Image (cartoon, grey):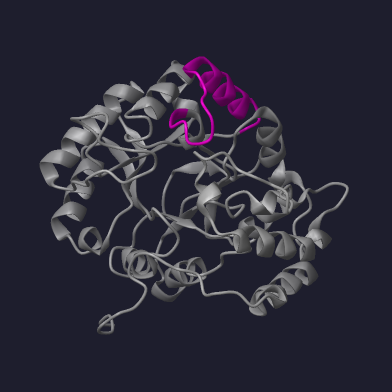
Amino acid sequence: MKYRTYPNSKVTVSEVGFGLWTTSTGWWGEKSDDEAVEMLHAAHALGITLYDAADTYGNGRSEEQLAKAFAGRRDRVVYATKFGYDFGGNPQARRGQSELPQDFSPAFVRRALEGSLRRLRTDYVDIYQMHNARMAQIDDDALWELLESLRTEGKIRMYGVALGPAIGWLYEGVDAVRKRNVASLQIIWNILEQYPGNEQIRAAYDAGADTGYMIRVPHSSGMLEGHYTLETTFPKSDHRSHRPREWLVNGVEKVRQLRFLELPSRTLGQAAIQWLLHEPRVMTVLPNIYDREQLSEFAQAPETPALTSGELDRIAELYASNFGIDEAPMAFKGTMSRTAPLPV
């Protein structure tokens, strides 16, 4: 494992992190808390130090799993968690992966942080993130002032924004960087889905910001792991089962053209991570990890051969031509255009 330090900070994280949505939500198969703790211990043994949770993952379950896994070892790990969803009240209100009501009011955020600290059994969070923030939160001066106060109080070490729930949210990310100099920005970005992540990362360079990036969905919903075929099917509970047939057909063809990235010492899934780590602003990559085999493969990715300039150029050429495939434009969520230009 290799490590990177967030710009202008003392927060150092492993280049591959562990997202607890796979152990706590049931969206990728059920795991007991004991199984989750075993997986977290295995991840730490492989050098993973960054663990990305959210108060709403399993209604607090992801944070409780971290507390069980790392009791007595808090100083050896970096906790990132998220806030902004009100998951109290009726536990049946949420169906599947549907969104819950959001609340970013100062009183609610303080209560949310205290709840996270209690479940994590710690007195500070390393990286505290707005969960699926919208433009209203990016523009809310009071919210940013509160987060700075929480940092001054020592309850959080840094704060950031985690964008979603689907790909898009261009100007939420750009403005978080340009207007707020946000310390950490979590986005979707991968070889097959480079937009709008490339613009969100470019914003840090243009603004001279201190922003470091967490990358989620690095394998494009598993496509870049290289195991899908035209015969692949998904369980009805899996979000990929609702995608059109063209997504699978086109994705398999794109991956076929990327097979040149596979080496005896590097899988396609590892190459997908190396493509992200070529960007210095990327602090950590958060692959979806379901089992020990995946964990071992992805944790070893930083030690595999880095992509050559020729490989990077070939990827750029393929992406620029959409791999020679004629398909409908991708649908985005969030703020993808402006009614007026941002003041310089």
Where in the figure is residue 269, as x and y percent of width and height?
Answer: 71, 49
**Quarter of the image containing the C terminus?**
bottom left
Q: Is residue 107 left or right of residue 51?
A: left
Quadrant of the rendered image containing residue 106: top left
Quadrant of the rendered image containing residue 173: bottom left
State which region is magenta: 24-47
Q: Is residue 64 left or right of residue 143?
A: right
Taking the spot 65% from the left edge, 45% from the top edge, the residue there is: 233
Q: Can you say whether 190 is above or below 2 in the image?
A: below
Q: Nearer the viewer, residue 247 or 77?
A: 247
Q: Can you say whether 175 is above or below 255 in the image?
A: below
**Quarter of the image containing the N terminus?**
top right
Q: Can you say whether 37 is above or below 188 in the image?
A: above
Where in the figure is residue 74, as x and y percent of width and height?
Answer: 43, 24
Where in the figure is residue 332, as x and y percent of width and height?
Answer: 42, 67
State yes or no: residue 142 in magenta.
no
Taking the spot 57% from the left edge, 60% from the top edge, the residue there is: 280
Q: Is residue 184 left or right of residue 40?
A: left
